[in-house]
Amino acid sequence: MRRRRQIKGRKTEGGLLELLYPPVCPFCGRVTAEDICDECRKKLKYIEEPRCMRCSKPLRSEEREYCYDCERHTHVYERGYALWMHCGDVQRAIYQFKYHNQRIYSRFFGKELLSRYGQAVKRWEITTIIPIPLSRKRRRIRGFNQAELLARELGRGLGIPVDAKNLVRVRDTSPQKKMDARGRSSNLKQAFAWRGKSRVFGNVLLIDDIYTTGSTIDAAARVLKRHGAGKIYFLTISIGQGY
């Protein structure tokens, strides 16, 4: 009887929360019964071919295999994918997700990543999903790590364990928005460390919200490789422009 009351209480509470905070489209803010409203769904353009064979940035020519950055830099990771270009409504949605406590957006973004790239992750034979960590200072200010929320959604959907404890950011690096590739790489030197008691086992999927030049993914992958990881892959919500 008590169990039934608890379940009923949870349902009532959930219904009340939905009434007070109805689900909204992450791109336009309109109340919608779907994850994304029909109008925004029509406007969104997923990254398709031709795209970089390494990082998946869209390319202008089908004759090219790699984007400008990947042609000029050797990456530590094997391959990765993103859903959309980092601009317009996508950029604004990620900003709301990160800086305005819209944690619920992680469900939608996670579902989209699963739908588009779940099969690729299975082919990669991933043993562990690891989110790119925040520094303690940024985590304290923000209250959560958006990459960890995404990783949890993917882990549940794919049945793959998530490790959000052992890869840590030991340096509170400067914001990288206006840095070039060299500046980003220098900024991230010794930014990450492995705190696990055991070595990393198997192939790892790194999760972040945005991919620009790959410096962050490479810096984290380098640490994981030093501690035994096999192949490193990544998934992000958005990505910068390829050339």
Image (tube, rainbow, N blue to C red):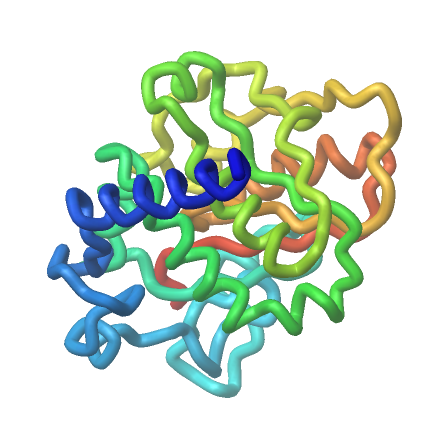
Q: Residue at x 26, y 58 (%)?
A: 90
1 or 64: nearer the eye? 1
Q: Relative to 110, is 155 on the left or the right? A: right
Coordinates of residue 14 in the picture (x, y in percent): 32, 45
**Residue sitting farthest toward the front:** 1
**Residue sitting farthest toward the bottom:** 62
Query: Height in image: 215 above or below 135?
Result: below
Q: Exactly how many numbered labels are in the figure? A: 0
Coordinates of residue 203 in the picture (x, y in percent): 79, 51
Residue 243 can be seen in this image: yes
Identify the image quadrant of the C terminus: bottom left
Q: Residue at x 46, y 62 (%)?
A: 111
184 or 192: nearer the eye? 192
Query: Height in image: 49 above or below 44?
Result: below
Residue 92 can be seen in this image: no
Q: Residue at x 56, y 46 (%)?
A: 151
Q: Relative to 102, is 113 on the left or the right? A: right
Q: Residue 169: which quarter of the image?
A: top right
Coordinates of residue 58 in the picture (x, y in percent): 42, 72
Q: Residue at x 47, y 56 (%)?
A: 110
193 or 241: nearer the eye? 193
Q: Relative to 40, is 148 on the left or the right? A: right
Coordinates of residue 233 in the picture (x, y in percent): 66, 54
Q: Residue 242: which quarter of the image?
A: bottom left
